[in-house]
Image (tube, grey):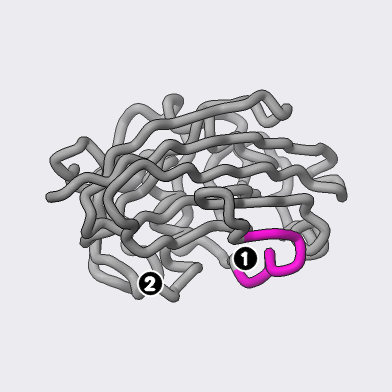
Amino acid sequence: MQLELRAFAPLLAASVGLGATPHGGCPGSAPHPDDRAAWAETHLRWVLGELEPPLDEHGNALIGRTVLLPIPPTPGDGTPGSAAVTLGRRESFTLELWGLVGTTYSDGTPPDPFEPVSIFETLDIRVSLDGVDIITQDNVLDFFARFALEPPIPLDEPPLAAAIWYESVGLFQPHLPPGTHTLELYAVNTEPAFGGFFEYDNTWTLTVVDD
């Protein structure tokens, strides 16, 4: 099913700490900047409450020198959302932008199969940083990841039992120069995903300060 990650994290208030190890690395270690799948899994496990990274001096979740950006809690119907984040000038950041999570169920419903990649190929998406496009429909698959979750992520939300796979579009951004920057996302699927359509219109105001 489609987990509304932007609203789902508060439902999983109890964190289990750094027990999970995304893609075989050390718990809490920083993946290589080019490893989209590892960063996607790290961010997802954090959003779903399974990872509790240390915080930087600005209160951001931090893996190495990379901040896990928060996701505005919007309902996926196009309602605009926003977040303001302060970053150190040596900090990169990563963020999941539009994703689908497959789950198992406690009521006997069969596990979700992967959704077609064509959903992402046809995604109506624009991601810009300071007015410059980074992700569009033309290059969206360059920012795509698809993988099984090993181990699965337990979900205490009956009938959802565990998250077992993830498909997503996300971004890893190297550190920015000091000043105020604006990251903007608009995304909506044009093919049904789990039978529905999910639209996001989010803005992040990023203030980069000297360390």
Q: Earlier in the sequence, mark 1 or mark 2?
A: 2
Q: Is residue 107 left or right of residue 11?
A: right
Residue 141 in the image: x percent, y percent?
68, 69
Residue 49 in the image: x percent, y percent?
37, 39
Q: Dots 1 and 2: beta carbons under 8 Å?
A: no
Q: Nearer the viewer, residue 192 or 23?
A: 192
- Residue drawn at point x = 58 percent, y = 56 percent: 132
- Categorize mark 1 by other alpha carbons within 10 Å: few (<14), some (14-19), many (20+): many
First to last magenta residue range: 135-142
Q: Nearer the viewer, residue 26 or 35?
A: 35
Q: Is residue 100 left or right of residue 10?
A: right
Identify residue type, mark 1.
Phe
Quadrant occupied by the N terminus: top right
State the mark number for residue 144: 1
* Depicted 22 relative to depicted 203: above or below: below
Tell me which corner region of the image, top left, top right, bottom left or bottom right, holds residue 184.
Answer: top right
